[in-house]
Image: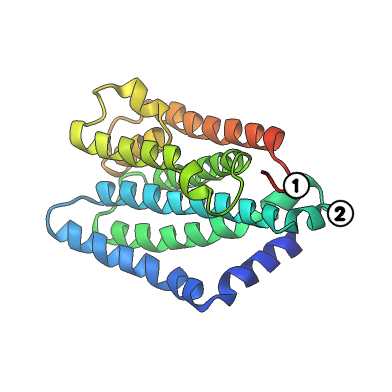
Amino acid sequence: MNAIAAAEFRMMFRNRTVALCAVVVPLAFAALFIGLDAYGSTGALAAVVAITIMGMGTYVTATTTLASRRQALYLKRLRGGVVGDRALLAGLVGPVAAVTIAQLVVVVGVLAARDVPAHPVLVAVALLAAEAMFLGLALATSAVTTSAEHAQYTTLPVFFAAVGVVVWLQLTGVDEWIAVKRALPGGATAELVIAAWSDGDLVAAPVLVAISLAWAVVGTVVGLRAFRWEPRR
């Protein structure tokens, strides 16, 4: 698995544009959110947007990576080795998640320096739970994605759900339609970040983490059962 992950890292950063974005993107996000903070936005709001949008980057990139590798018969060749299926898939998508987490550490760290979260450990837990959720959903989505181009369409439902619930939370608050918001992808982690950052009610924190991890588990189980190693038609 480590060799596969290292190869994916090399392929990811061999492209100068991708390598540059890995450094510039978090700094650009940090500068943007600092600017929003100066105009009355809060660290909690900026952190929720960053974790969701950059988490969606993990979701879309992982889905596209698995679909394109399948179509190029790369997955089929790798499967002929000694590495098991789960370790193989982890090696392929792990680098994507690692780069996103590193970016988020920079962005959230800058936000925390200006607006210190009340419970930073819970913010970190929410960040990791969100990444696990998006990786699980990526595995499930890639199972029904025929190509990298097709991923532009198959990822849209989760994209709109995750972004929509964040906007909904910001416009109406947490209490209205709370069960629906928590059930949507990203809703539980967004609520947890807001509560942990602003020292809100944390009684539901275990439930919120469990919901996000449930999405991760369901996505992973469905993805592993439905995944195809041969090119899809």
Q: Residue lying furthest front in this view? A: 233
Q: Residue at x 38, y 65 (%)?
A: 26
Q: Residue at x 50, y 74 (%)?
A: 19
The quadrant where residue 94 appears: bottom right
In the picture shown, does residue 74 fall above or below 182?
below
The quadrant where residue 139 appears: top right
User: Closer to the camera, 19 or 48?
Assistant: 19
Residue type indicated by callout 2: Gly
> What residue sits right under mark 2 in the picture?
80
The x, y position of residue 68, in whole percent, is 63, 56
Q: Residues within 10 Å of mark 2 (few under 14, many from 20)?
A: few
Earlier along the polypeptide chain: callout 1 or callout 2? 2
Q: CA distance from mark 1 to mark 2?
A: 13 Å
- Say left or right for 40 vs 191: left
Whether residue 42 is visible here, answered yes or no, is yes
The x, y position of residue 104, in whole percent, is 42, 58
Quarter in which the C terminus is drawn: top right
Kindly check if marks 1 and 2 are in contact, taking CB atoms under 8 A apart as contact: no
- Say left or right for 212 vs 89: left
The x, y position of residue 82, in whole percent, is 87, 54
Residue type indicated by callout 1: Glu
Label 2 residue SS: loop
The quadrant where residue 161 appears: top left
Label 1 residue SS: loop
In the picture shown, does residue 29 fall above or below 122?
below
> What residue sits right under mark 1 in the picture?
230
User: Closer to the camera, 173 or 231?
Assistant: 231
Whether residue 93 is visible here, answered yes or no, is no
Q: Residues within 10 Å of mark 1 (few under 14, many from 20)?
A: some
Quarter in which the N terminus is drawn: bottom right
Q: Residue at x 47, y 44 (%)?
A: 153
Q: Residue at x 65, y 65 (%)?
A: 8
